Image (spheres, rainbow, N blue to C red):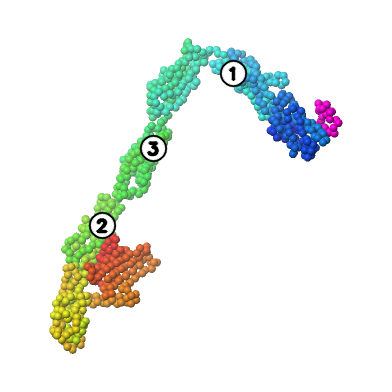
Amino acid sequence: MTKTIGYRDWRWQAFLWHFLLWTTVVAQTRYRIPEELKQGSVVGNLAKDLSLRLSEIFERKLRVAAEAGKQYFSVDAGKGELLVSDRIDREALCGQSASCVLPLQVVLENPLQLHRIEVEIQDVNDNAPSFVKSEHVIEISESTVVGVNFPLQNAEDPDVGSNTVKTYTLSKDECFTLKVRDIDNGRKMPELVLNKSLDREKKSVHNLILTAIDGGNPVKSGTSKIRITVLDVNDNVPFFDNKLYKISVQENSPNGSFIITTKATDIDNGPNGEVEYSLGIHAPPSVLALFHIDPISGDILLKDNLDREKQSSYRIDIIAKDKGLPKMEGHCSVQVDVTDVNDNAPEIVLTSKPSSAPEDSSIGTVVALLSVRDPDFDKNGEVTLDLPKGFPFTLKPSFSNNYALVTSGPLDRESVSVYNIEITATDAGSPPLSSKKMIAVSVTDVNDNSPQFSQNSYNVYLKENGVAGSILYSVSASDPDAGENAKVSYSIVDSKVHGVSVSSYVYLNSENGSIYSMHSFDYEKVKVFQVVVEAKDQGSPSLSSSATVHVFILDQNDNAPAVIYPSPHTASHLRVPRSAKAGHLLTKVTAVDADSGHNAWVSYKVAEATVASLFTLNSYTGEVRTKRAVSEHDDSSQRLIVEVKDDGEPAQSATVTLSILLEDGVSEPVSELRHKAPDPGKKGGTITLYLIVSLASVSVLSLLTLLVLAVKCMRGSATCCMRQTHSNEDKKPNRNLQIQLNTDGPIKYVEVLGGDVMSQSHSFRSCMSPMSEYSDFTLVKPSSTTDFKEVISVLDASLPDSTWTFESQQVSTTFV
């Protein structure tokens, strides 16, 4: 935008003359703006250019009037700026005029002043060149001489100056060029020039584009189509579009499928341009059997099935003849490539028969060789093999689709003796095809398992006095191996029982593991012994394992009680003073039984008495006391027959006769208790043994009684405890032996509590009563064999000659 101040146009002098009487300052201002400005665009600052204050715009009521009639401008009173208020089209206002100026009048009051404003509208390249007709048709004979000019229509552009039409261009054509001539007022005239001879058979119609370009920025253009028709002269023969056609056909295409259209053209007219098609006279039988050509359209059709695996490509010769005289013919060839279709599933072929694999085979051992083939091509012939998961085998590729089936992990015939491996072959076609092959691989046995007994230890309970040669027990061991590796033989591991080889006690059948007694057993001599049995297989090298058979001899009531005091073999008289009161102790009958448990429990009773009301006998202790005071009427000679009976089944008994003399003045009524030991020469050895056993039993009972009394005094109950404790650092089990006693002394209840390092408690409980049916202790839930031994050692130390029976969830064992 530009501004010019200080020049008066002569055209306004007459108008200004009428204002000479006013006090005015006349001036002229010019602005330059481009057309098509947006509404609100600023043209110039009137207040500044007219040297006015902004307040004067309101006070003096400034207004703008257009001389042309239509108002295109307005004034922003707040800023004093001249603004565009409507669209300005230079072409509509001034047409093709080189200059376009809009005059404006600016009027001010108080004092009245008039200012002339000119706004020059500059041209913008907003119009493109255009032709009157969008298409121009010209007919030219193909025999026209080169160099002839043909006038073309002009293009019009309403813009002026450099924005109007500047030049013309023509689309490329080998036969025509463009020539542009200058005419009056700088206008341009386009002309078409024939640059090369025409040939209708080559090109019967030329379509050209004439483009008019203006000189604006950016450049605008307009186009017109020029259609040139070439008139014909007959001088050509049939001609194929291609000398060689190439086409791909899928091998599964059905009969009658369209293959390709061969097209031959004869640019002559009439019969000379009509063409017929046929196969070449030298076509091979395979082509004639598969393909057919339509003589009119030139379409090649399929008339039989293709097979890519038999032949992948065919070459077909085609002839095209016109109907002229003489006939002219053209030739071409069609190459048909057969595209492979995934119509063949892969095939797995065993190269070698699968071999057996020992179960100790190393990883990588070859068990089978195989190959895979697929007659399809490319991706359809690419095959991958898959093995199911969980098998210790893998496929190792070798060469040219050959594979080796090898071991990939350890084998165990005892777990799986035969592997049925299903191999899947899948090609890469779409959709993929697959096939399966089952291969059976046998695993041969290796002696890698030792015979195993059903238990580590067995408990056998055998009554004494049994028949020699009777079967004690049958142990059995199994070996999961096969053949000779699984054949098991049994033998006894030599050991000593009381210094004698265990083989003298039992006999073992080496084939079936049956154990037989060699002789009768006496509980009083042997209570328990162990037989270690070894099971060995026939493998190479052979493997073995062992188990322990604990043989417990059960006591039978085969011994009658033996009276050791008073001696039944020595005649003696008990002297009792007639002054004896009720409860006076005469003597104590003592008897022992070589049996054990209930069979050794003895009780006493009076079998016969001279006077039944005079004496009483304690059935448990054997003490003989006066039942009442002795009177003078009682006979001086009394006799008691005492029967000692055990608790066995059937029970056995013995008797002893007591001769009692009632005398006056006897001071030591029990002096007979202090009798001398019998003569060793008269069966004294046996009596001495009985006496020792009796004294030991009495000592033990006395010790237990003292313990009971001590516990009662300390706790006020009938319980005593024995504890054996190990520190947690040693990680050994704690043992707690608890014995509950009756108030009268005999052991009634035993409880053994144990805990191991895993804080698993075990409880052993037992009940024993002189009146119960069984005399052995029953202990529940032992932790191990070691626990048995510890418990036994404690109980044996306290209660010798007692039978202890331990019961657990696995075994039940009796110890003596």
Q: How far is the residue under mark 2 from the one under mark 1?
A: 114 Å
Q: In screen coordinates, is 654 left or right of 37?
A: left
496 left or right, relative to 654? right
Q: Give the SS element for disc 2.
A: strand
Residue visible at 25% across and 65% down in the picture: 814
Residue farthest to the right? 21
* Residue denoted by label 1: 227
Marks 3 and 1 sit apart, C-alpha to C-alpha, by 62 Å
Q: Is residue 414 above or below residue 533?
A: above
Q: For the residue marked with disc 3, what is the amino acid?
A: Thr
Per the picture, the main secondary structure of the magenta-coloured stretch is loop
Sort mark 2 into few (<14), some (14-19) or many (20+) by Cα contacts within 10 Å.
many
The numbered dot on residue 426 is 3
* First-in-chain label (3 vs 1): 1
User: Disc 1 marks which amino acid?
Assistant: Arg
Query: Which residue lies at the image location 26% right of the left edge and 56% below the top edge?
Result: 477
Instruction: Please say whether residue 166 is visible from this viewpoint.
Output: no
Taking the magenta stretch, the answer to whether it contains residue 454 is no
| Cβ atoms under marks 2 and 1 closer than 8 Å | no
Q: Residue 535, labelled with which disc?
A: 2
Quarter of the image where one finds residue 120: top right
Q: Is residue 224 left or right of residue 468?
A: right
**Is residue 7 within the magenta segment?**
yes
Query: At 68% across and 20% down in the image, what residue appears?
Result: 188
x 37%, y 68%: residue: 726
Label 2 or label 1, whichever lies nearer to me, is 1
Mark-to-mark CA distance, 2 and 3: 52 Å
Q: From which residue to which does the magenta span run? A: 4-29
